[in-house]
Amino acid sequence: MKLILRVCLILLASACGVANANATELPNVILIFADDLGPGMLGCYGQNVVTTPNIDRLATEGMKFNNYYGAVYCAPARWTLLTGMHDGRIGGWANNRGGLPILRDAGKITEQEYQKRLAVHKANSNPIADDEVFLAEIAQKAGYNTAQFGKLDRGFLTWHERVKRFGWDFYEGYYDHQRCHGFYPPYLWRNGERFDLPGNTMANCGKTSEKGDEPLGYGGETYSQNVFMEGILKYLREHKDERFFLYHPTQLPHGPVAIPKLHPDFANHPSMTLAEKKYASMVKMLDDHVGLIMTELKTLGIDDNTIVLFSSDNGHELYYGPKNEYRQQKFADGQPANLTDKKWRTSECGDVFDGASGRAGLKRSGYQGGMQCPLLVRWPGKIEAGSETSLLSSHYDFLATMADLVGVQKPSGKDGISYVPTLLGKPQTQSHDFVFVNNNFKVMGSRALITGEGFKLVEADRSKNLFQLYNILSDNEERFDLASQYPEKVEHLKQIMQQETNSQRPDLR
């Protein structure tokens, strides 16, 4: 009997030891979420003008995703990331309105009127179901500390109680995404407390014009992105001995362009306009800040047990150069573009950076230039350095991936699928039949459905019921419409697109 008891105790101790060993291997998680940065602006995806060595290092020391999708616009992209649902679901495009604090700060409405409007805004801002589970709550369930720095939550105007409901233990940033269009806010918010930024006085946070020709440093003295970096590094130092999930939805490089000073790579460039130099410097600052984070992880001795992911909300956007031509759908010579054999592309329309790297369209477009995003993932000793994958994946997969990383069961009904097996070089036994990207804009195509076998159906012109079919694995620039060759496939995918548009959420009761 004593022998049996001793064996049981040994087995129990062994089991506890295994559990503790596994627990110590649970990684810290950092997600850096750029704004309006298509993959074409990164060296590891082909950028030749702006160098991004720190971001590229995530690819050389980790995994690069080549078939990854976000949304076509900022608010739906953040919604799909934080909910784990595709943005065709009811609520995916139900963002609220921003700008109310700017009216108050500019003296256009009184504080009393502001409070009245804010109360109405809160009452009408997409109520959250009691059983809804958000991304940060997954980490909280595993005992992680959660923190967010930058553009807070999904958009466009949030408040303290709502940010906390999304699962953030600590946060610092902008409540109002319209204020994010300027980089010199008079104040920001930290855990419900307002704090002022020295030398910044403009109600619109120093938002520049579309031309971007204002002098360097226009708007104030304290640049918001520098504030966030100070906060992030401080947070890492204070939580180095605890498990954490840190999410950094940065403003960079969303415009209008603004930067305290030009990066040396572009300060004396002989042919770039001031707006182009500013934009390139914003991308360089983002890259430099990724480098600061990675260096801090090494300094603190937590680099090996931290998984770092880098992505962006949607495709490339212009805040310089041929922006008006894109809006007018014209080429540099004034000739009109079309949606068949002459799609608008940065490679052919005067973009000095070719920011969409040959892809058709930009942000708000149903073509690849509007929705294909970068995803780089680094986890030393776990992810093979320099590896790549063409696994079909999306922002809404990250919630399921987070659950897998931290050892929590994925909530039922979520649309996402964990890509942890792919990260670890194991068989990906679950994969998407399709990824759906909703789109209420009509600039260049609207909704799109991408299948696991590589076909993409684009609702090119909703008013004309025009659909196009591409094989994006062999034709990522969407130059060869295959709809006439595969009419049955087009009809089948149209039915799926129709059923997914404004569909019910299976994750909610």
Image (cartoon, rainbow, N blue to C red):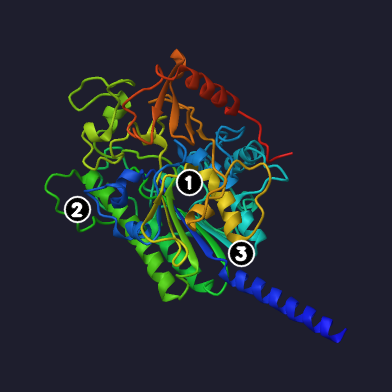
Label 2, secondary structure: give it.
loop
Say above or below: 243 vs 311.
Answer: below
| Element type where label 3 sits in the image | loop
For the residue marked with disc 2, what is the amino acid?
Phe
Counting residues from the start of the chain, the first of labels 3 and 2 encountered is 3
Residue 65 point in image, percent of width and height:
41, 48
Q: Quadrant of the C terminus?
A: top right
Badge 2: few (under 14), some or many (20 or more) residues near its Cα, within 10 Å?
A: many
Mark 1 or mark 3, which is nearer the start of the sequence?
1
Question: Distance between the Cα atoms at labels 2 and 1?
Answer: 35 Å
Say the numbered circle drawn on residue 266: 2
Front position in the image: 379 or 261: 379
Answer with mark 2 or mark 1, whichever residue precedes in sequence: 1
- Viewer-proximal residue, 391 or 293? 391
Quarter of the picture containing the N terminus is bottom right
- The percent coordinates of residue 273 (x first, y second) are 19, 43
What amino acid is labelled 3 in the image? Tyr
Q: Nearer the viewer, mark 3 or mark 2?
A: 3
Q: Which residue is mark 1?
A: 105
For residue 218, say whether it is visible.
no
Kind of residue at disc 1: Asp
Please give the residue where the numbered disc 3 appears in the rendered image.
144
Q: Is residue 167 left or right of residue 81?
A: right
How far from the left and from the top, in percent, is residue 356? 31, 39
